[in-house]
Image (spheres, helix red, strand yellow):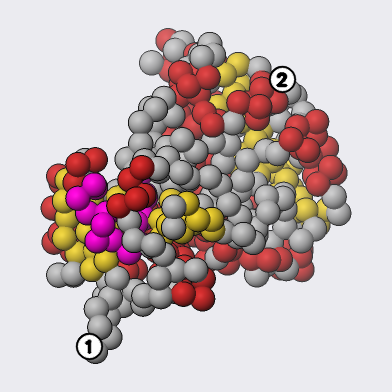
Amino acid sequence: MIIGVLKEIKPGESRVIMTPTEVADLVSCGHKVLIQKGAGSKAGFEDKDYINVGGDIIESREEVYEKSEMILKVKEIFPEEYNLLKENQIIFTCIHPAANKEEVDALLKKKVIAFTAEDTHRYGSPNAEVAGKLGALMGAYHLLSINGGMGKLVCPIAGSEGANVLIIGTGIVGKGATQVLSSLGAKITLMGINMGELRYCQEVFSNNVHTVFSNKHTINKLLPNMDIVINCVKWPKHRKDHLITKDMLKLMKKGSVIVDISADVGGAIQTYRPTTHDDPTYIVDGVIHYGVDNIPGAAPYTTSIAYAASVFPHIKSIANNGIVKACIRDGYLRRSLTTYKGILTHEETSVIQNREFKTPEEVLGLLNEEYK
């Protein structure tokens, strides 16, 4: 198979989906790997590193699309790429289909076979862990007066207490944020709805972390005392309510910080809007909002190594076995199938966008007797 690795075009995004380690593995299996020039350079992987393991460097994005049977990248397909897609081409990237109707339209129109990478992780994405840990550090950074914050150090010093932090969500993101800030000595309230997870976190984290069950009433009571609020909860697209509304910002201190790692427009944080690494914050009612929606892109070396290792088994399986066999072998890959030759196969997207869909099992013929 001819496999293309693209350079990311999203502002502030420097990750690469395959390091030379994964390219070497594919080449050893007999596949041809085309890497767009400079795809890994900002993550610490030079073109010569890919050449040394058998990869081919291609000058332009257009040529990679034209020559490749399977396209690999980290972030979603952008409008300037839509016309480069080819019928029956395999696309493996983070599509976020439910939130990107135009992108889904393009994938369907071009009749590509698209997998949304964020749905393939059996044990959670490394990107989520990086987002939690780095988002926590960004909250601490923007609490400083030089960045518009109240001027409070997140960790305590002799004679002065550290910051009070509310972390909403006990998944991989929330645990990552808690690990970083608890190690710095911040006083953390960790909020969630899974009692088992809350119990686990109470046991493994330090004494400066205490856990509470998540609800709006409790958030209202906690907000006046919080210096940093970190949202780690992915909000269902169909919900119209919010965990923290604009009116609730009046309860918070001037110069306090909200970090919305989940980055859902119209989601848990009503006042959230996307920002970039170049211009990461804005202020609403005296509260600093950090809204970068690709936080892991700021640590491309670390994230690329972990992320590539996480998704590579799926990529290798598709290349070695073909789509049907690869999807039979792994249900996580199968559930990530988003479009198949003009047919929507992603149920959440179907519900949110009110589209017809077929299951991956239907379009791949896995309901036939031989596969039962």
Residue to which mark 2 is pinned: 109
Residue drawn at x 57%, y 19% as measured from the top left: 344
Q: Observer-nearest residue: 340 or 229?
A: 229
Left or right? Give the position of 59 relative to 306: right
- Quadrant of image for the N terminus: top right
Mark 2 belongs to which amino acid?
A: Lys
Question: In the image, is residue 228 part of the stretch drawn in magenta?
Answer: yes
Residue 237 image point, x, y percent: 44, 29
Mark 1 belongs to which amino acid?
A: Gly
Residues shaded magenta: 219-233
Residue to which mark 1 is pinned: 159
Callout 2: few (<14), some (14-19), or many (20+) C-alpha neighbours within 10 Å?
A: some
Q: In the rendered structure, are the residues bearing label 2 and label 1 in contact, judged by CB atoms less than 8 Å apart?
A: no
Residue drawn at x 44%, y 74% as measured from the top left: 144
Task: Give the vertical position of 256 relative to 192 (above or below).
Answer: below
Left or right? Give the position of 132 relative to 67: left
Question: In the image, is residue 132 part of the stretch drawn in magenta?
Answer: no
Residue 168 image point, x, y percent: 30, 50
Residue drawn at x 24%, y 40% as measured from the top left: 216
Q: Earlier in the sequence, mark 2 or mark 1?
A: 2
Residue, far bottom:
158
Total marks placed = 2
Describe the element under mark 1 as helix, strand or loop: loop
Give the distance between the C-alpha atoms of the residues marked 2 and 1, in whole angstroms: 64 Å
Task: Give the vertical position of 146 relative to 250 (above or below).
Answer: below
Q: Observer-nearest residue: 112 or 145?
A: 145
Left or right? Give the position of 281 relative to 217: right
